[in-house]
Image (cartoon, helix red, strand yellow):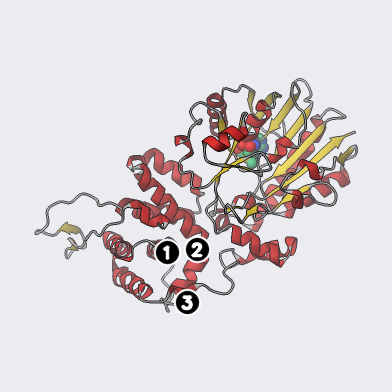
Amino acid sequence: MPPGAAHGDRFYDFEYMTENKRGRQTRHPSNRPQKAPTGFAPRSEAIRLLDAILSARKPFDEVWAKSLENGALKTMSEPDRGLTRLIVMTTLRRLRHIDDILSTFIKKPLPQTAQSVRNILRTAIAQLHFLKSPPHAVLNIATSLAAMERSTRPFKGLINGVLRTYTRTDPEKFSGPNAASVNTPEWLHKRWQHQFGRENADLIACAHRLEPALDISVKADAQLWAEKLKGTLLPTGSIRIAGAGNPVKLAGFDEGSWWVQDAAASLPVKLMGDIAGRHVLDLCSAPGGKTAQLLAARAKVTAVERSPQRMKRLAQNLDRLGFEADLVIADAGEYSPPVPPDAILLDAPCTATGTIRRHPDVLYLKTLKNITDLAQVQKRLIDHAAEILKPGCSLLYCVCSLEHEEGEDQITEFLKKTRGFSLDPIRKAELPGLEQALQSRGAVRILTHFIADAETGLRGIDGFYIARLIKS
Ligand SMILES: C[S@@+](CC[C@H](N)C(=O)[O-])C[C@H]1O[C@@H](n2cnc3c(N)ncnc32)[C@H](O)[C@@H]1O
């Protein structure tokens, strides 16, 4: 069954809402009050969330959390929340392809002010073309949604016409030849071509089209948990679960046996070697996936994080896992521990272009200026970390970004100007299953298409850059 069809789509007629002469909505006298039908609330909320992401330029996580706390998602059932999320994510992952499809039907561009109309159409095409939802439900709800708002009402006929025409057209007509790159904004695709070559840039873009599986890190007994959760134990040590649904509902979550962490995000700590009993300074630590790993490896951890809210989340995560660390709310570029640490992990703030599979909003929210601004922040943080590190100890630098300015260039510049530091080359044997990520000088560059298991269909991994440095 296609994903969109699993949510009980049914036909509901909203045409009992009519408009009186002053433009106010009134209920048609022949109809009794009706309660909101199944499928309406998730679709309506998906459009509202897209408006907030694409027009107000707010990150998905922020608008989702706000709605869960105070908005429509708060009272929505779990399956309806799932449908809302699926529609928003699919629309963001396929946005430019969807806009291409729409442009074949809408010859005159919609006015700039018609953002909600655009998003009603986009979400409808996402459901029809990519999620294969039943057309009658999608069409009726889309036109009904248009009828409900004064700003979208004049476009109700257009929405109905476009979607009806789509349903009468052969969908094959819309699988364009450059489907690999079409969903990536041109400036980003060009950067990736320049950095990694055309083929890799296309493969990265392809990986972004897929709903990623759930990756988890376990405290212990990985093979056992892989079997219990019907997952696959990856060579990197993470467990990958396809179609897992809401992770908090899975066995072992409440007991704190594991935590959600992408397979790539779990590598930096693994590359720190034996840290049992050593004092590790975890700079930029929330929400704490790597802090949990450090603690599972029996290190003594001081976790530093600038955002009090994010630190609260880290504390809750550690609490669930039964771990304890020293938590410090501070700027990692200024914090100096009373005793110099034995090792530092700097998981620096970045543009997160390596996480587009899970955060497709990044495609539309990040700009070139974000890259250059964040490269400055990273430079300040790494310089400070270098200063407070004990001689003979390691500094592990990583970012979940695909951009050279935040990874390769950052480390090249740092090594050029910082005396006493060199790369401690990572070896192939330390990267089981990800050997192709090893660069000639011993740093690691993971691209989003690097794990591809044709047999299980478990594809993709977050993009990361990792360098292990040593202070002489
Ligand atoms: C990439 S995330 C860290 C992810 C975390 N290490 C993990 O594995 O769960 C970067 C974090 O750095 C924090 N941050 C940004 N600037 C900072 C600064 N100057 N000092 C400390 N933390 C900072 C952000 O709030 C964010 O939580």
Mark 3 CB within 8 Å of ligand 1: no
* Label 3 to label 1: alpha-carbon separation: 17 Å
Where is mark 1, residue-wise? Answer: 122
Which is more N-terminal, label 1 or label 2? 2
| Horizontal side of residue 139 vs 347, given as left or right | left
Task: Say which mark, if any, is on residue 95.
Answer: 2
Task: Say which mark, if any, is on residue 173.
Answer: 3
* Label 2 to label 1: alpha-carbon separation: 7 Å
Q: Residue at x 63, y 32 (%)?
A: 305
Q: Quadrant of the C terminus?
A: top right
Q: Is residue 53 above or below residue 182?
A: above
Q: Position of residue 109 (x, y in %)?
A: 44, 74
Which is more N-terminal, label 2 or label 3? 2
Closer-to-camera residue (125/242): 242
Of marks 3 and 2, the one in the foreground: 3
| Horizontal side of residue 146 vs 380, given as left or right | left
Q: Is residue 265 above or below residue 17?
A: above
Q: Position of residue 58 (x, y in %)?
A: 50, 50
Mark 3–mark 2 CB contact (< 8 Å): no
The amino acid type found where label 2 is placed reads Leu
Q: Is residue 447 above or below residue 395?
A: below
Query: Residue 329's image quarter?
Result: top right
Toward the bottom, the furthest residue is 107
* Label 3 to label 2: alpha-carbon separation: 17 Å
Mark 3–mark 1 CB contact (< 8 Å): no
